[in-house]
Amino acid sequence: MGLREPGLCFVDVARGELRGATNRYVKTLADLEGLYEDAAAFEALRREMGDTVVYEVTDYKPSDRAGDMIIGVTRMLPGKVGREYFLTRGHIHARADRPEMYYGESGRGLMLLESPAGEIRTVEIGPRTLCYVPPFWIHRSVNVGTEDLVMTFAYPADSGQDYDIIAKAGGMRRRIVDDGRGGWTAVDNASYRVRPAALVDAILAQAS
Ligand SMILES: O=P(O)(O)OC[C@H]1O[C@H](O)[C@H](O)[C@@H](O)[C@@H]1O
Ligand SMILES: [Fe+2]
């Protein structure tokens, strides 16, 4: 492979986007059907703002080759479906041994992480917080604030995203909800099904 040219992008924190990005990906509220616990609250909100872009990713992707890197910005609207804070769909990397980093630019959020065996971690992200998502952890961002959550991220270019792992388990093991005092708390997801041990082992055995 020949040498690449250096890249230069600008993180527009106020607009929550990467200027100079090569890709843009948006999700409307309607795209997130089935992710929230309160289906009736989701339906009501969908009638009101189903077409609203609730999160947007702009990124700079020089290639998708091993050893290369994708850098970008995520912007998430604040809000709740019932008591549950707005979230991203969430995924594990298709090459599960790939890590990621998130850097808080503005707003108040958290990274919700789940190991294949169902252990949960939450990492609060505010301005200047750098969050390391280790290999093999399912991850989803949650906006627990009242303003847009803007984060810069970077991850290996050949990581890929696997969304099925969450769908097949009935969601992530915990949900991030309003604690009634303006903060958040994590509660059990009643629909969650623990992964079979053989599947957990197969995921953790991945290395490439
Ligand atoms: O892919 P989702 O779970 O919808 O999350 C949206 C985005 O979140 C982060 O910013 C990741 O770095 C992106 O690669 C991802 O696409
Ligand atoms: Fe990721």
Image (spheres, rainbow, N blue to C red):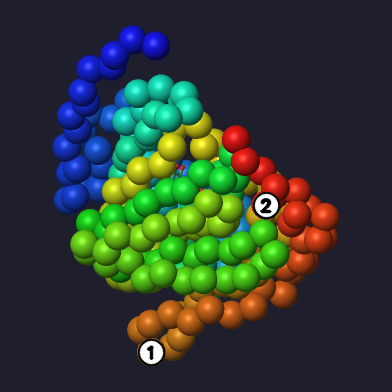
The residue under label 2 is which amino acid type?
A: Leu
* Residue 162 image point, x, y percent: 62, 43
- SS for tag 2? helix
Residue at horizontal 62%, vertical 41%?
Answer: 207
Q: Earlier in the sequence, mark 2 or mark 1?
A: 1
Relative to residue 141, is residue 208 drawn left or right? right
Q: Is residue 13 visible?
A: yes
Q: How far apart are the alpha carbons under marks 2 and 1?
A: 39 Å
Q: Is residue 47 visible?
A: no
The residue carrying mark 1 is 181
Relative to residue 49, is residue 165 drawn left or right? right
The residue carrying mark 2 is 204
Residue at horizontal 44%, vertical 88%?
Answer: 180
* Residue 99 image point, x, y percent: 47, 48
* Residue 27 image point, x, y percent: 47, 44
Residue at horizontal 50%, vertical 31%?
Answer: 158
Residue 39 picture quarter: bottom right
* Residue 137 image point, x, y percent: 56, 57
